[in-house]
Amino acid sequence: RFRRVRFTRAVEQFLIDKFAKENDIDVSHMRKDIKITGALAKADPLIDKDIMYDAYLRRPIDEIFIEASLITNYHMVMDYKLYFMISRIYHYSKANQVKAKLVLVVPKYSKKYIESKPDWLRYGDPSELIVRLKELYSPAIENGWLEIVEIDVSQKDMQTLEQSAIVDN
């Protein structure tokens, strides 16, 4: 049986690894599945809730929080999650006087692969959804709080990841 959660995690890890490789980042320096917690989380004056980021990297010039997403459909929950993630980083950055941003890593699917997923297309082509996100979050992008990075993912890559999500039962 196909396990959607397993597939999603596999794709997210693939995207993070490929992002790291394309940016000459040693993945051993990345922390995975992190939260801004404790006093640092309290820097947000609006809400007291933890949020998980897929990865985190402290560099000499800044700190980056990384979130990988399949971007197969567009919905308000995604808007709110991204807004919350960016807001938390904004408050963290101000409270700690550090430069920080969210890097949203998304797949750039091959046209052939997308055409094989008609259920994904009912929400719109994922590349169009990314354009909508870039328009909606243009202030965050222009002010350095958000960077959206598209990672090329081949049909073969996606098929391999799909196979990894199939389990016997």
Image (tube, rainbow, N blue to C red):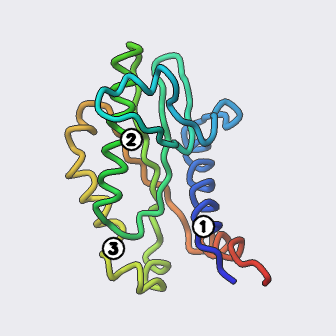
Viewer-nearest residue: 14 or 51: 51
**Circle 2 or circle 3, nearest the eye:** 2
13 relative to 138, above or below: below
Q: Quadrant of the C terminus?
A: bottom right
Point 47% across, 72% down: residue: 110
- Which residue is situated farthest in the top direction here? 97
Q: Which residue is mark 3?
A: 125
- Which residue is situated farthest in the front direction here? 48
- Badge 1 density bin: few <14, some 14–19, many ≥20, Cα 10 Å: few
Q: Which residue is mark 2?
A: 85
Residue type highlighted by circle 1: Val
Q: Which mark is residue 5?
A: 1
Q: Quadrant of the N terminus?
A: bottom right
Residue type highlighted by circle 3: Asp
The number of numbered discs placed on residues in the rendered structure image is 3
| Labels 3 and 1: the sequence-earlier one | 1
Q: Are discs 2 and 1 less than 8 Å apart at CB? A: no
Viewer-nearest residue: 112 or 82: 82
Point 63% across, 40% down: residue: 32
Q: Quadrant of residue 164?
A: bottom right
